[in-house]
Amino acid sequence: MFLQKAWRTAAFGVFGYLNFTKSGFIEHSKKFKEDEMKIRIDGKNCVVTGANSGIGYAVAEALASSGGNVYMVCRNKERGEAAVSKVQSATGNQNVYLEVCDLSSISDIKSCASRFYSKEQPVHMLVNNAGLIDNNRTTTPEGLEMNFAVNVAGTFCITELMLPLLEKATPDARVITVSSGGMYTSPLTADLQFSESKFDGVLQYARNKRVQVALTEKWAELHKNKGIGFYSMHPGWAETPGVAQSLPDFSERMSGKLRTSEEGADTIVWLALQLKEKLVSGSFYFDRAEAPKHLPFAGTSGSHGIIDSIVDRLYSLCDLSK
C-alpha cells in the first residue's frame, strides 16, 4: 500500500509537470482547431458555479461571448455583482445574471434550484466549477466536512436538482464537472468526510475530485436515454486566486509555469460548444481530448465499483429522492 501510494504520487508529479503546466498547454494547443471555438450558443441558458473569479469567471465570459444567457452562481453577492458587470462590459452581452448561492449549503442549493424552476426555462448546460481546498477540518452548519460539502455534496445536489430543467433542453443538454488531476493520486473511498485522525486537506480534495469523475460515469449510465451529456475534465495547473490561497507553496514554486485562468477554462468552453456527437458521455477530458482516468499501475481503477453505495449516501445526505 505504501509503495503504491508513493508510485501514484511520483507518477502524478512527473505526468503533471510534463502535461498540466503552461508548456503542456502550449504543446497540446498545436493540435487545437480554431473554428471549434467559434460556435455560437445564442439563447442557450448556461449555469456556471464558482463564477466570480479564476476559471469560473473565464468560462462565464467565454460563454457570454458566444451568445449564451449566463447565470453566474457565486457565494458572495458583492463580488458576484462586480463579476457580472465585468462580463457584461467585456462581452457586450447583457444576458448575464447573478445567482447568489453558497455551494456548501444543501438548503441554499435547494433555494437556488427553486429560483431556476420558477423561471420555467430549460438549462442547456451546467458547469460544476465551484471547488475548495480547506487545509483545516471544518464543518458546515449542516454537519458536513467543508471540502466534501462544496466539492461533492454541492456538486451532486445541484446536478440532481437541475436534471428536470436539463431534460427540457434535450437533446443538447450537458453537465460539465471540473475535476482535477489530483484525483490521479487517490482511489475512490467510502470515507467521504475524512474521519481519519490527522486531517489532510489536499488528500481530501483529491478524494473529492475522484468522486466527481466516478459520479460523472454513473450519471452518464443512469441518464443515457434522456439526452443529457455528462463530462468531467481537468483544467491543468492554473494560476488562480484559489490555488494561490490554498496551495501557496505550490503556487510560489511553480511561478511562471502555471496556466492562465483562460487556458484552464479552455476545455470547459470547448466541451460546452461542441456538437454532442463529437463527445463521449461519462468520459474525462483534458486539453480538448479524452484522457485516462487512472495512471498505469496506480491501483485506482477498481475502486469505482463502490460508486453505487456512495450515490445512495449522497441522496440521503442531500435529502433527495431518486
Image (cartoon, helix red, strand yellow):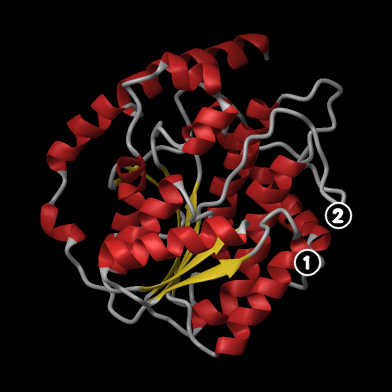
- What residue type is disc 1 on? Ser
- What residue type is disc 2 on? Glu
Q: Position of residue 63 (x, y in %)?
A: 33, 64
Q: Is residue 64 above or below residue 25?
A: below
Q: Quadrant of the C terminus?
A: bottom right
Q: Viewer-proximal residue, 222 or 251?
A: 251
In this rendering, position of residue 35 left or right of residue 146: left
Residue 200 seen anywhere in this rendered image of the structure: yes
Residue 109 lies in quadrant: bottom right
Q: Is residue 29 above or below residue 41?
A: above
Q: Viewer-proximal residue, 4 or 236?
A: 236
Q: Position of residue 60 (x, y in %)?
A: 39, 60
Q: Viewer-proximal residue, 86 or 99?
A: 86
Pointer 2: what residue? 142
Pointer 1: what residue? 107
In this rendering, position of residue 179 left or right of residue 36: right
Mark toward the start of the polypeptide (2 vs 1): 1
The Cα atoms of the two marked residues, 2 and 1, are separated by 9 Å
In this rendering, position of residue 311 left or right of residue 90: right
Residue shown at 72% from the left, 24% from the top: 200
Q: Is residue 249 above or below residue 263?
A: above
Which numbered circle lies on residue 49? none
Under tag 2, what secondary structure? loop
